[in-house]
Amino acid sequence: MSLESPDKIENKEYRYDSFENGKVLLNKKKNHLPAMGWNSWNAFGSGNTQALTKIMADKIVELGLKDLGYKYVILDDGCYKAQRIDGKLSNEEVKFPDGFKALSDYVHSKGLKFGMYNDIGTNLCAGAAVGTCGHEKTDAQSYVDWGVDFLKIDNCYYLWDNATFSNPENARFVFAPNIKSICITGKGIKLNMSALCGTLTGEGVKVENDYVTWIGTFDGTNTGTSPVGPRSGELKFVINVAEGGIYKLTVDYATGRENGTGEWLQLAVGAGENCKYFYDDLLSSTKDKQTFATSQEIEIELQSGENIIRLMNHRRQENTLCSYAAMLEGLNLAAESHDIILSLCEWGKTQPQNWGYKVGDSWRILNDITFRVGSDGDEGYGVWYDPGTPSVTSQYNKAVVMDEFAGLDKGWNDPDMLMIGMKGLSPVMNKTHFAMWCMMNSPLMLGLDLRRVEKGDEIYNIIANKDLIDLNQDKLGIQAKRIWTSYTCTQPDKEYIQDINRVDVLAKPLDDGSVAVSVFNLSETQISGPVSVDFELIKEKLGSKLSDIFVKTAKYTVKDLWSKKESTSDGKIIFDSLEPCDSITVKIIPQA
């Protein structure tokens, strides 16, 4: 990306209209299972060091976690010098005295993989002025030279959006101006059309007084924004002309530099493969967002008959896609055959479930799961419920309705790192937290100080539960679907529910023909009544995702994946009361 203005997008595969075509960019590799490992942030924040990282790598091996799949050891923010040296990234010499290549070699010597962190903006979230923006090729070469296997790329100080620590006026790039009317002339006609005569589509866009505003992509950083459905708003006009050819269009508009009103207009005719852009740039600023002016004439091409004219701004998604793609392109240039995992950490701001699969292996769905990170000797703090993003249930509530966005051919929804072992969470909460992440195919990134874990202790028995891990790493790669909830709704697999006073039932088809089922009590009170799961409901909700043997079998073995006890069933299982925040996870195995 340019450092002065977002680049012109020449390749339509980077456009909004390509997001549903299923095509990846830049030969992004597919079929990666969710990444597993340890990340330094929750345990140590910016205080991580070379010494601590080596200790964590040693503990992963000592505890046998490596053999269970925990293989990535990732340095988060706080590891670089505050400024570039000769244009390149370099290690903070007090905390990482031997440099990143030496640390990478140490991690690799343990049979583990090495991961690092950066940002698509100018600075890292902790402030160091070493973001990748404008340096993607140089940084990619450094990462390849250091033997990096995993990159977590954040979204602070981003130049083309009002992201965290960015200039709020950057909203000018990601919202269209307020639109009052359009005028089309040519071929002997003149059409004046009020914006109120157009059609509004997508999230957020609305009418105020006699104009349309909030044309852009709804911000998904915080809770409350459903990931399902069109997240970008447009103003559309259906125009019929007798003669095809070139026409001229002007827009009556007013600009701003704030959420809902910007300066960047995209104007296109048609949709999908047939979409053609005729304007994609800033309009001249007006006095304020309610002082309207007439734009310059924009030449458009219309076909005889019906045409759909679209006024929009999808650059919030397109710009961010282009920035992450620049890093992937740099990695491809540095090492064509690389297999580096690219973790997109833009907090769900630009609805990455729509486009993240094109360049990334996973994409964060919300802001951080905790802001109370630890330091050496202090394990940080996590909570079960919070109305904002920093809680187990906040992350789960959104991720659980995102199953159709994930898969081996796409990548994985990332509700952030595990908080197991942090203050504030009880053993029961930790157990349910782990089961949730395993069922949802979320990356399993431990975030605790592993010096506090011993084989066979309470934390170990959760994070080392191989049966649960196997669900997360199942070769079929299908995220569990919510097939029932006690909360009143019509589509439990699609409706974004934030009220935690409920029980959810999730079902996940597995490669061996069996099905995993979890029952989650999200409430902080006991559920006294029994919960039953009828296998016919599983068959109805999972449909063609199920194996023939599961559908046709009349007898099943049911294995509790925590207690390891087995029982038989002929088509229904009944669970007794559940303690607050508790859960049950079973594997339903069809009998031959």
Image: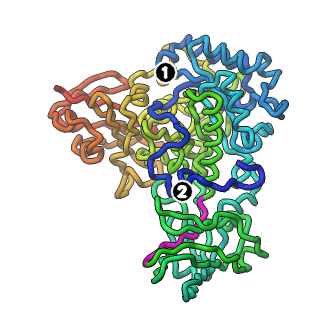
Q: x, y percentage for residue 428?
A: 47, 31
Task: Identify the mark at residue 495; answer none if there is no mark.
Answer: none
Q: Is residue 482 above or below residue 576?
A: below
Tell me the residue that label 1 is attached to: 69
Question: What residue span does the magenta drawing correspond to?
Answer: 305-314
Instruction: Please state which of the two labelled residues, at mark 2 or mark 1, is closer to the viewer.
Output: 2
Residue at x 66%, y 14% (from the top left corner)? 105
Looking at numbered disc 1 in the image, what kind of residue is underneath it? Answer: Gly
Prevailing SS of the magenta stretch:
strand
Residue at x 56%, y 11% (from the top left corner)? 62
The C terminus lies in which quarter of the figure? top left
At mark 1, the secondary structure is loop
At mark 2, the secondary structure is helix
Q: Residue 363: say if magenta.
A: no
Q: x, y percentage for residue 575?
A: 30, 36
Image position of 427 (left or right of 94): left
Q: Do the numbered discs 2 and 1 sit on residues whose CB atoms are within 8 Å? A: no
Tell me the residue that label 2 is attached to: 16
Looking at numbered disc 2 in the image, what kind of residue is underneath it? Answer: Tyr
Q: Distance between the residues labelled 2 and 1?
A: 36 Å
Q: Is residue 153 above or below residue 174?
A: above
Q: x, y percentage for residue 213?
A: 62, 72
User: Counting residues from the N terminus, which is met first, the one under dot 2 or under dot 1?
Assistant: 2
Q: x, y percentage for residue 290?
A: 71, 78
Residue at x 30%, y 42% (from the top left corner)? 531
